[in-house]
Amino acid sequence: MKRGGAGKKAAKRKLQPRNTSEDLGTVEMIRPDQRPSRVRVSHTTAPPSRTPAVAPKAPAPPSNAARPTGKGPRRGTKLRVRAVAAEEDLQPFTKPGEKLSLCFTELSSDDWEKKLDALKMVRALVQHHPALLQTKLHEVCLVLAEEVNNLRSGVACAAMATVAKLHVHLGRAMDPEAEWMGPVLLLKFAQTTNAFILDQAHLALDALVEACSPGRILPALLNTGLRHRSAAVRGCTAQHLHQMADLMGGDQVFAAGKIFAERVLTAVSKMAVDAAPGVRHHGQMMLQGLAPQTDFMAMWEKIVPAKDRGPLQKILRNLR
């Protein structure tokens, strides 16, 4: 307090407010494509607003862009047999006989990777060297039936894909194998609920129905599938019987012979009143396709007992 005039002037300067016009800089607008420049901030802060505006550092995504959910269609659910057969890029072998022998060796191995390689070789052989493969066709099918029941799902699916490819490329040559290969595929529906495995089994059965003659398909499906306790097995059987009838046409079912037509009508009559909805659906659709045929009513009254006709006649009236 006793410094005199110089001390008073210094204290007076400290008490004076700072000139905000000298220190306060202007804030530049930041564009998304530019890095922000250095900003001078005032010592005097204004009261914050409720929603302070912040300039984005990067362009915002469009509002209507849907975030991917990761739930696409399951593999195999939209495929068809011939499309599946054409997908692989398989090259012919220079020594196919040696490869055929190697297939049997590797399929008998406990190494699942060797099994997958051997199954791929079988698919290449049937595509490029079908005549050679037919010399050992029954032996190949026996090994494939074992691998269809492999506990490793990858090997089982590869085996069923190989079965489908055999039917696609060999056609009616697979008739002798159909009667026991069909039940092997049908029983997969009683052994697992894995959707991918069941899709592969459906594809293999599709190929069997499309390639083999109806006289071989019918026992392959009926001897095991229609009497099975599992609704999934009966449903798969009904689906592929329906597929066979569609491929043949209603008139050809009766033209194929009396025994064949009677077996089909007997099966359809049981399917149409089955406890499982999926089985009933295919049975009633088949009944609707067969009912307009000329020989239907006479044969139907002959093979269906009178006590069982009531529910079926009601179904026929509803279908009409």
Image: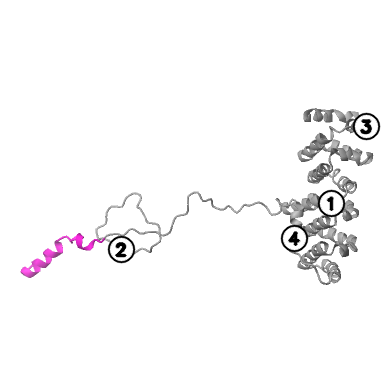
Under mark 3, the amino acid is Lys
Residue at position x 76%, y 54% from top? 82
Check residue 39 in the rendering and tell me which mark sits there, or answer none: 2
Nearest to N terminus: mark 2 or mark 3:
2
Q: Is residue 138 left or right of residue 128?
A: right
Residue 157 located within the stretch drawn in magenta: no
The three-letter code of the residue at mark 4 reads: Gly
The residue to which callout 1 is attached is: 211
Residue count near mark 1 (Cα–Cα under 10 Å), binned few <14, some 14–19, many ≥20: many
- Proximity of marks 4 and 1: CB atoms separated by less than 8 Å: no
Residue 302: assigned label: 3
In primary-sequence order, the first of circles 4 and 2 is 2
Amino acid type assigned to the residue bearing label 1 in the image: Ala
Q: Give the crowd class for mark 2: few <14, some 14-19, many >=20 residues within 10 Å.
A: few
Considering the numbered disc 2 on the image, is that residue within a helix, a strand or a loop? loop
| 30 relative to 233 in the view: left or right | left
Which quadrant of the figure contains the N terminus?
bottom left
Which of labels 3 and 1 is toward the front?
A: 1
Q: Residues under labels 3 and 1: Cα distance?
A: 32 Å
Few, some or many residues within 10 Å of mark 3 (<14, 14–19, 20+): few
Q: CA distance from mark 4 to mark 1?
A: 25 Å
Could you say where residue 203 lies in the image, as x and y percent from the top left? 77, 52
Asked whether the beta carbons under mark 4 and mark 2 sit within 8 Å of each other, the answer is: no
Question: In x, y percent, where is residue 187?
Answer: 82, 51
Asked whether residue 8 is drawn in magenta, I would say: yes
* Tag 4 residue: 154
Q: Is residue 284 above or below residue 130?
A: above
Q: What coloring was used for the rendering?
A: one colour
Circle nearer the N terminus (2, 1): 2
Q: Quadrant of residue 42?
A: bottom left
